Image (cartoon, rainbow, N blue to C red):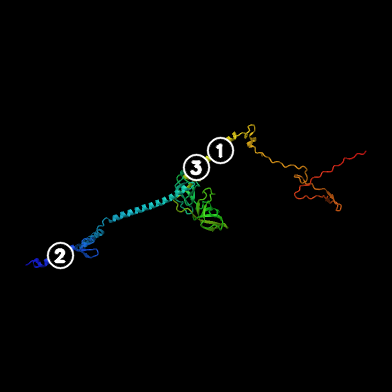
Amino acid sequence: MDSFFDRYRNLAVLLAILVVQIAGLAMQVHRTSAGASTLDVTDPSSVRLIRLWANAVISPPERLIHNSKMGVGGFWSNYFDLMHVRQQNQDLQKTIDRLRLEQAALLEDARQGQRLQALLGFQQRYIYTTLAAQAYGSSGSDRSHDFYIDKGSRDGLKPDMPVITADGIVGKVRDVFSHSAQVLAVNDPTSGAGVILESTRIRGILKGSAAGQLEVVGIVADQRIKPGENVLTAGGDLIFPRGLPVGVVEKVVPDPEQDGLINIILKPAAHLDRLDEVLVITSTEPRFSPQDQQDIDASQAEKGAEAAAINEQVKASQVMAEKLPGLIDPNLPPDKQPLNDSSNPNPATPPPQPLRPDQYSPGHAYTPPNVEPDPNSNAGVETPKSTSRTPIPDGAGPPPATKPAPQSPPQRDR
């Protein structure tokens, strides 16, 4: 029996020659990136045709094997190899809870830092001495509004000290203990403070209502009071300094107990329902910043230098006065020295006295003329004697006085 190669030897040789020829052509022919065939071997974007054929033959089975391996491995990992997944999930859940708590704590610390930074900036700018304190606790009743702070008598607190924030007033210290103190809020019904409206300058008394609202009571009805007006402390209650923010006018309502009066409902300037950090004013003596104190000291130094210069000038003038002759007479008492003599050295000359005074002379008293009875009238009626006067022209002086005529002496009888 002939073998297969012997029977098909010619066909096998022909096929081998064709395969070799095709392989040789595939080694010479290049395929460009545009899909065209070329014999140019210098083209960098061209690929040998035999390489493309090899890739087309080998890639499908290789891809099939790779996908089968990945599918079998994923099926095993996701469905059979799950022995420690439950424990890992529990550990991850605990880690997530811990990170959430840490995030909440960091967020609260960041908010507290912002509040403390704002409070510190206000404390540094405020002119009075203050003490920062942490607010905690409450009265536990809806009708009273007070809370506690973590500063007490050992920190220098005393009753009736004002408590404020950077936004406005909060209340006053009521009871003081060693390490804590109780603060009565301004919206408590038993509290009170003197306030003034910023624009209209109307004064009133600040009270707290049973519902915890701020009210200014005892105000005479005035059309100028409008919502949105700022209300400040008046300073007359001897507790809160003047000019601190109290709140904003929210609405105006009539007084239910007294006709003609109104109550002003305020929106508090400070957040009385969520207090965390407060400031207690421990002294109302003015406190200046280092820059302001330096300016004040420089001003005082300049004033001292000016005062010293003035004193030197006074001393020099005194020395000069002592050296000048004739200004001080040692033989005269101090009150009669020429320097202390306040009399006029050039007195005014009195006016000359008239040689012949008459009725027109200064200081001459007017004498009425003699009165004689009128014979034609009723008895008891007197008429003045007629006197003839020569009119005096304008600008002329008074007529000269006439001398009486000389009389001859009486003759004796012989």
Residue 365 at what x, y percent from top left? 77, 45
Sequence order check, earlier mark of 1 and 3: 3
Which of the numbered marks, if any, corresponds to residue 298?
Answer: 3
The answer to which of 13 and 134 lies nearer the viewer is: 13
In the displayed structure, does residue 381 sit left or right of residue 110?
right
Q: Considering only vertical position in the picture, is 32 above or below 144?
A: below
CB contact under 8 Å: marks 2 and 1: no
Which of the numbered marks, if any, corresponds to residue 79?
Answer: none
Secondary structure of the residue carrying tag 2 is helix
Q: Is residue 136 visible?
A: no
Residue 245 at what x, y percent from top left? 50, 52
Mark 1 and mark 3: Cα distance apart in space: 23 Å
Mark 2 and mark 1: Cα distance apart in space: 129 Å
Residue name at image x 40 percent, y 51 percent: 110
Residue name at image x 58 percent, y 35 percent: 320
Mark 2 highlights which residue?
21
Residue name at image x 49 percent, y 42 percent: 298
Mark nearest the camera among 3 and 2 is: 2
The answer to which of 380 and 384 lies nearer the viewer is: 384
Q: Amino acid under label 3?
A: Ala
Q: Amino acid under label 1?
A: Gln
Q: Amino acid under label 2?
A: Gln
Rendered-image quadrant of the N terminus = bottom left
Mark 1 highlights which residue?
313
Neighbor class of circle 2 (other Cα within 10 Å; few <14, some 14-19, many 20+) is few
Which residue is situated farthest in the top direction here?
331
